[in-house]
Image (tube, helix red, strand yellow):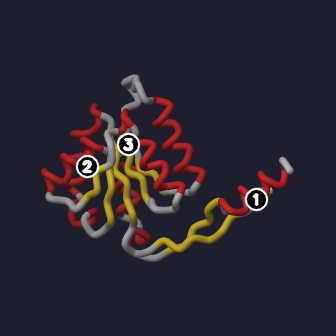
Amino acid sequence: MQKYKQLKINKKKNIAIVAHDGKKEELFYWIGENLDKIKKHNLVGTGTTASVLKEKYNLNIKPFLSGPIGGDQMIGAEIAKNNIDILIFFWDPLTAQPHDPDVKALLRIAVLYDVVVAMSPSSANFVFNSHLIDEEYEKSTIDINDNLSSRIKKFK
């Protein structure tokens, strides 16, 4: 049986921001409307999205690679290290993406590690208007050490 551990999430959240090309304008508009709320947190994002947000809104955001060339996987790695609390990912359901397996892997790892995911303006509004956005809270996440030791025992 999978074991979980409690993880404390700080008041200042670690937020990853991603948007497909067809949703970037929608995301940029949403960020502009919520700038006071979002700039209080630690931000990272994929290449173009993070770079535009940094320039357009003077946000302190760490850019990773562009999504199709590894940025989605970089964010997934940060999630696996429990370094991301919220994923804002405005993805385009109407356009085929050449890196669709990376997108699915990112969403899978976000669910596995119980990361809050906002995929549209409405879901982002719910997240950022929750009282939890500015409070500490605890979540249950997979205990990776227990998971690894259980897997090793199975093959000894």
Rendered image quadrant of residue 1: bottom right
Residue 86 in the image, given as x and y percentages of width and height: 43, 58
Label 2 to label 3: alpha-carbon separation: 11 Å
Identify residue type, mark 2.
Ala
- Cβ–Cβ below 8 Å for labels 2 and 3? no
Identify whether 113 is placed above or below 74: below
- The residue that disc 1 covers is 149
Identify residue type, mark 3.
Gly
Residue 67 in the image, given as x and y percentages of width and height: 36, 38
**Label 1 element class:** helix
Task: Give whichever of discs 3 and 1 has the lower sequence position.
Answer: 3
Task: Give whichever of discs 2 and 3 has the lower sequence position.
Answer: 2
Rendered image quadrant of residue 96: top left
| Residue sitting at x 32%, y 39% | 66
Identify whether 37 is placed above or below 25: below
Which residue is nearer to you in this view: 132 or 6?
A: 6
Identify residue type, mark 1.
Ser
- The residue that disc 3 covers is 71
Nearer to us: label 3 or label 1:
1
Label 2 to label 1: alpha-carbon separation: 37 Å
- The residue that disc 2 covers is 50
| Residue sitting at x 20%, y 59% | 59
Which residue is nearer to you in this view: 89 or 132?
A: 89
Residue 63 in the image, given as x and y percentages of width and height: 28, 51
